Image (spheres, grey):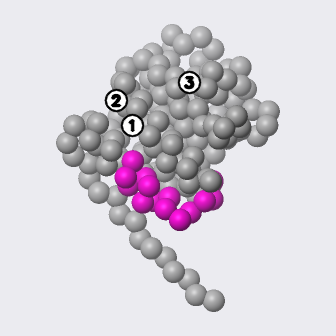
């Protein structure tokens, strides 16, 4: 039996925000290349994005267990373990099938405060066809941290994650 490990080294991002997200998506593709394990890919992508983006305090996945969203691999402070589909920004993303970009989480109806320092959030729903896989969630201590470029870039990274599961 032999063991082959390949090292992955993230490179520093440069250029415009759009270019940086293109670079990050390319790194994400390299990171999940030839790996289909959901937990492994969610863990590595959480770490990649957490360390690449400024002003984020939580990056991770909530996975759907058939009833509710359950915390999966993440980077940041300990998180809420379970989120009902009817609650918070994560629940809204999962049920509407639309990315939720929230400038001020304290103004969001039903917001769940897993970390009191979080001020803004973006959550990308993860679907394979009609099947809910979970959500990709990013929090920031900075109000209005995420803009349309962040949303598009994070949706591209979520697409990389979903394609790795096929």
* Contact (Cβ within 8 Å) of mark 2 with mark 1: yes
Give the numbered dot on residue 98. Answer: 3
Determine crowd level at label 3: few under 14, some 14-19, many 20+ residues with C-alpha closer than 10 A.
Answer: few
Q: Please tell me which residue lies in front, 143 or 130.
A: 130
Give the numbered dot on residue 144. Answer: none
Quarter location, residue 9? bottom left
The residue indicated by pointer 2 is 149
Please tell me whether residue 48 belongs to the stretch shown in magenta: no
Give the mark nearer the N terminus: 2 vs 3: 3
SS class, disc 1: helix
Determine crowd level at label 2: few under 14, some 14-19, many 20+ residues with C-alpha closer than 10 A.
Answer: few
Q: Is 4 on the left-hand or right-hand side of 166?
A: left
**Residue shown at 47% from the left, 36% from the top:** 155
54 to 44, vertically: above or below:
above
List the single residue furthest toward the left.
15
**Residue shown at 33% from the left, 44% from the top:** 22
Q: Which residues are magenta?
A: 25-38
């Amino acid at each position: 039996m032999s063991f082959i490990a390949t090292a992955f080294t993230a490179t520093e991002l440069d250029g415009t925000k759009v270019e940086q997200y293109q670079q990050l998506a390319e790194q994400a593709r390299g990171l999940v290349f030839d790996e289909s394990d959901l937990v492994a890919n969610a863990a590595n992508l959480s770490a990649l994005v957490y360390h690449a983006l400024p002003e984020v305090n939580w990056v991770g996945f909530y996975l759907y267990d058939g009833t509710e969203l359950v915390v999966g691999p993440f980077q940041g402070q300990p998180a809420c373990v379970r989120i009902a589909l009817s609650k918070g920004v994560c629940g809204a993303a999962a049920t509407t099938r639309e990315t939720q970009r929230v400038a001020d989480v304290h103004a969001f109806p039903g917001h769940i405060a897993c970390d009191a320092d979080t001020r803004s959030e973006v959550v990308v729903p993860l679907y394979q066809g009609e099947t809910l896989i979970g959500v990709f969630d990013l929090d920031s201590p900075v109000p209005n941290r995420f803009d349309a470029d962040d949303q598009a870039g994070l949706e591209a990274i979520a697409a990389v994650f979903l394609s790795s599961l096929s």
